Image (cartoon, rainbow, N blue to C red):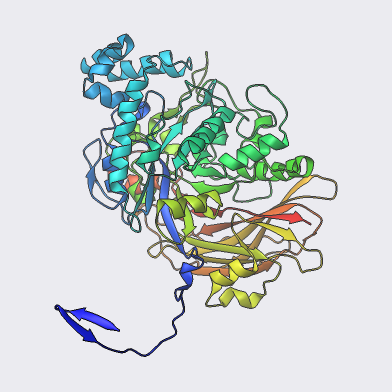
């Protein structure tokens, strides 16, 4: 062969070597071997219900904070995450998107609109709350856009998309384009966060859909379908807070025409909404104590008093609001229709309106700017939901001290890119955390043995012989009951683990919906009592010092668990719940830091937890 070097032609001979075309195994099949942490639901000053009431942080600020930089909060306090996030979705409300920013800039296009000039003048006169109330009463309460000018939406959307795109760093940090579609039927919550897989070239080909356009989720799905057809891109939506939906989130009839759910509806819903945001600031939505009476951990940050302030909760609404109940009802629908409308994976998010995705108990900046650290007693007494019924006594008011400092989404993927993370969300290989970053991995299959739990190629073997969280397993009656291989590891600087539980839901031989909670691994030498109840792990929390010790619990737990009650003819699902040992809540940290009085029923100790996406078992 001839080589040219410094202009000289040199003849040389090399021995022939046989080289495999693809040496690296990940070229053939990328392995989802890493968990990435982030928030799919954060609001900045571009959301009217944030920017009009004091949020001064832009998407740029929010993304810098998520990447680990120090920023200054809207109330002037320096803030930083202990550990950066891997991804973030800036999901500002689509309804009059960017109105607070347009007002601050005295945007000429805004001032052409009589209504826009009116709210602008109120804000500039120092009457921001009056302007916000005007928007609420004349816009959101009526479900009608008080300023239907797409040019204004385009200005804000382009601004957000540009800021987000500048922070996307494939392999290091993922900044997703997205928005929140804020459907509020009456005062019931049917909100969805829309997340694009694509870059700005495709995201800018559309404008965000708002509740002023439609409040029907089926019309949102039309919008998502149109986007994909128009751009060749990909998009999905994530519902949240069914606990404030008054039974509408997982209803048995469609929203507008009240027709019973059919196969086409079930398939469309799971095509566009593969996930559910099961835990966040406005309460935990895994299950309710009235629905899971034998589950001792069911009552966790339960927000169950009513909607957004205009009607109280009734018991018949609960089964159509919580994730576990919806998953069970989904099995019944699949038996009846041949498709499951509620076959969703589970994630957590913050829903913070401060621009700060802070889900840590000792670093919680609150739901809104007005309840950030340093806001005084208002941080606890502010009504996130205010009872607005005539003659009320505040029975359905929910004050901020009842808020959670959570949650987060864990995504199993092979790399930190929009494409890899979005694809993992679409296939439901995700799990929810209430704020800590404990690692949880689950595989299910009928060909596993207990020895597979400790293999060096645990994940590769899991994919080869079973399915991961979010998958579906076809039960073979000629094989043993499915085995779940479960590994859980605490956050490096976090609390030890109490236990691993498997939650099973199934249809019995009569078609009735059943559930069972199994303790499958736990720390210490505890033993279940005669009724199968495992003793509590203990409690090392010093409430006065807002501290705890890892002298109880275990840094890692694992289990190779086979269902002792398996019936291959029954439809079922399994998901894993991992509990940490008790730790101080954000209120305990607040009390130590600020010394302010707290309500008598303030929760000072909690057990953080994670919920994995289910694995579904389908009989052959």
Figure quadrant of residue 337: top right
The quarter of the image holding the N terminus is: bottom left
Q: Is residue 374 left or right of residue 417?
A: left
Identify whether 560 is placed above or below 130.
below
Residue drawn at x 53%, y 58% as measured from the top left = 579
> In the image as oriented, which residue stretches furthest toward the right?
510
x, y (%) of residue 553?
50, 66
Can the viewer see residue 617?
Answer: yes
Residue drawn at x 70%, y 45% as measured from the top left = 328
Judging depth in this view, the residue of 4 and 614 nearest the camera is 4
Judging depth in this view, the residue of 218 and 553 nearest the camera is 218
Residue drawn at x 67%, y 38% as measured from the top left = 266
Judging depth in this view, the residue of 364 and 573 nearest the camera is 573
x, y (%) of residue 197?
44, 45
Q: Is residue 100 left or right of residue 560?
A: left
Residue drawn at x 40%, y 60% as measured from the top left = 548
Q: Is residue 415 left or right of residue 356?
A: right
Can the viewer see residue 599?
Answer: no
């Amino acid at each position: 062969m001839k080589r040219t070097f410094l202009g000289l032609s040199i003849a040389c001979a090399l021995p022939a070597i046989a080289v495999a075309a693809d040496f690296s195994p990940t070229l053939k099949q990328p392995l989802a071997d890493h968990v990435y942490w982030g928030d799919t639901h954060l609001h900045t000053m571009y959301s009217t219900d944030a920017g009009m009431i004091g949020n001064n942080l832009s998407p740029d600020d929010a993304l810098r904070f998520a990447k680990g930089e120090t920023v200054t909060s809207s109330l002037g306090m320096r803030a930083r995450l202990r550990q950066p996030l891997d991804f973030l979705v800036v999901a500002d409300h689509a309804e009059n998107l960017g109105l607070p920013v347009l007002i601050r800039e005295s945007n000429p296009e805004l001032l052409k609109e009589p209504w826009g000039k009116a709210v602008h003048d109120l804000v500039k006169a120092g009457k921001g709350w009056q302007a916000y109330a005007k928007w609420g009463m004349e816009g959101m309460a009526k479900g009608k856009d008080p300023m239907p000018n797409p040019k204004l939406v385009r200005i804000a959307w382009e601004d957000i998309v540009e800021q987000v795109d500048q922070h996307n760093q494939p392999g290091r940090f993922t900044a997703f384009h997205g928005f929140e579609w804020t459907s509020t039927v009456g005062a019931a919550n049917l909100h969805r966060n829309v997340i694009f897989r694509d870059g700005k070239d495709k995201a800018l080909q559309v404008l965000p859909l708002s509740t002023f356009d439609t409040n029907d989720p089926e019309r949102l799905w039309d919008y998502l379908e149109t986007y994909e057809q128009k751009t060749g891109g990909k998009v999905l939506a994530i519902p949240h807070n069914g606990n404030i939906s008054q039974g509408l989130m997982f209803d048995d009839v469609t929203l507008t025409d009240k027709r019973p759910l059919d196969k086409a509806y079930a398939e469309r819903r799971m095509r566009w909404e593969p996930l559910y945001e099961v835990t966040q600031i406005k309460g935990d939505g895994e299950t309710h104590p009235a629905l899971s009476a034998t589950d001792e951990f069911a009552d966790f940050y339960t927000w169950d008093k009513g909607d957004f302030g205009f009607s109280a909760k009734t018991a018949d609404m609960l089964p159509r609001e919580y994730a576990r109940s919806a998953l069970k009802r989904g099995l019944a629908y699949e038996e009846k229709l041949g498709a499951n409308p509620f076959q969703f994976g589970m994630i957590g998010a913050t829903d913070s309106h401060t621009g700060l995705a802070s889900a840590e108990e000792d670093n919680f900046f609150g739901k809104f700017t007005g309840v950030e650290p340093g806001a005084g007693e208002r941080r606890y007494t502010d009504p996130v939901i205010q009872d607005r019924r005539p003659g009320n006594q505040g029975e359905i008011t929910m004050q901020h001290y009842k808020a959670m400092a959570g949650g987060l989404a864990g995504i199993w993927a092979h790399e930190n890119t929009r494409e890899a993370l979005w694809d993992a969300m679409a296939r439901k290989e995700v799990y929810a955390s209430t704020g800590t970053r404990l690692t949880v991995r689950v595989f299910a299959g009928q060909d596993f043995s207990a020895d597979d739990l400790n293999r060096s190629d645990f994940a590769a073997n899991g994919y080869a012989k079973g399915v991961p969280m979010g998958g579906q397993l076809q039960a073979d009656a000629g094989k043993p009951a499915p085995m779940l291989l479960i590994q859980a590891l605490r956050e490096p600087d976090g609390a030890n683990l109490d236990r691993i539980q498997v939650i099973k839901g199934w249809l019995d031989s009569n078609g009735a919906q059943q559930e069972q909670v199994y303790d499958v691994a736990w720390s210490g030498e505890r033993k279940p009592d005669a009724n199968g109840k495992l003793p509590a792990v203990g409690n090392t929390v010093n409430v006065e010092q807002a501290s705890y010790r890892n002298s109880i619990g275990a840094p890692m737990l694992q289990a190779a668990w086979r269902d002792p009650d398996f019936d291959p003819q029954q439809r079922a699902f399994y998901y894993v719940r991992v509990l940490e040992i008790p730790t101080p809540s954000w209120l305990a940290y607040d009390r130590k830091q600020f010394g302010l009085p707290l309500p008598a029923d303030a929760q000072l100790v909690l057990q953080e937890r994670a919920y994995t996406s289910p694995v579904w078992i389908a009989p052959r």
